[in-house]
Image (spheres, helix red, strand yellow):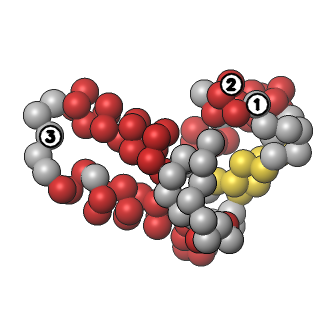
Amino acid sequence: MAVAQRRPARGVIHHSDHDSQYTALLFTGRCEQAGISISMGSVGDCFDNAVCESFHASLKKELIHRRPWRTRVELANAIFEYIEIFHNRQRRHLSLGMAYTVRV
C-alpha cells in the first residue's frame, strides 16, 4: 500500500526487526521489485525500534485508550484515519528533524 500510494524512489530503506513477516520471501521479493533495501536491527537491541515504539505509545495514548470502541471495524477505521490523515500529514515528526507540521 505504501509503495502504491507514495511511489518511493529507488534506494529507500525499510528498517525492521527480525519478525517472520519481514523475513518472508514474498515481502523481501516485493521490496526488491520496488527498489527498497532491507535493513534489520541486531537481535535484542531495543534502540533499533525506539521510534516505532514511540509511535505505538502515541497511538494508544492519543486514540485507542481514550474511549471504548463498539466494534473492531470502528476501531480499525479510526486507526486508519489517525495514521493516514493525522499522523502522516499533520503531526510533527521531531525525531526526523521536522519542527513544523507536515502537509501532504
Label 2, on which residue? Answer: 4
Tell me which label, 3 or 2, sits earlier in the chain: 2
Give the Cα distance between marks 3 and 1.
Answer: 34 Å
Tell me which label, 3 or 1, sits earlier in the chain: 1
* Secondary structure state at the residue bearing disc 2: helix
Q: At which x and y percent is residue 91?
A: 49, 57
Cβ–Cβ under 8 Å for marks 3 and 2 = no
In this rendering, would 5 be left or right of 49?
Answer: right
Q: Is residue 25 visible?
A: no
Quarter of the figure with the N terminus: top right
Cβ–Cβ under 8 Å for marks 2 and 1 = yes
Q: At which x and y percent is residue 42?
A: 68, 67
Residue 4, quarter of the rendered image: top right
The vertical placement of 55 against 72, above or below, is: below
Q: Residue at x 11, y 34 (%)?
A: 70
* Tally of numbered tags: 3
Q: At which x and y percent is residue 69?
A: 14, 40
Tag 3: residue type? Trp
Give the Cα distance between marks 3 and 2.
Answer: 30 Å
* Secondary structure state at the residue bearing disc 3: loop
* Secondary structure state at the residue bearing disc 1: loop
Circle 1 packing at 10 Å, graded few (<14), some (14-19), many (20+), is: few
Circle 2 packing at 10 Å, graded few (<14), some (14-19), many (20+), is: few
Label 3, on which residue? Answer: 69
In this rendering, would 69 be left or right of 52?
Answer: left
Tag 1: residue type? Arg
The image's mark for residue 16 is none
Label 1, on which residue? Answer: 7
Q: Residue at x 81, y 30 (%)?
A: 34
Question: Which residue is at the front of the view, 26 or 81?
Answer: 81
Q: At which x and y percent is residue 75?
A: 25, 37
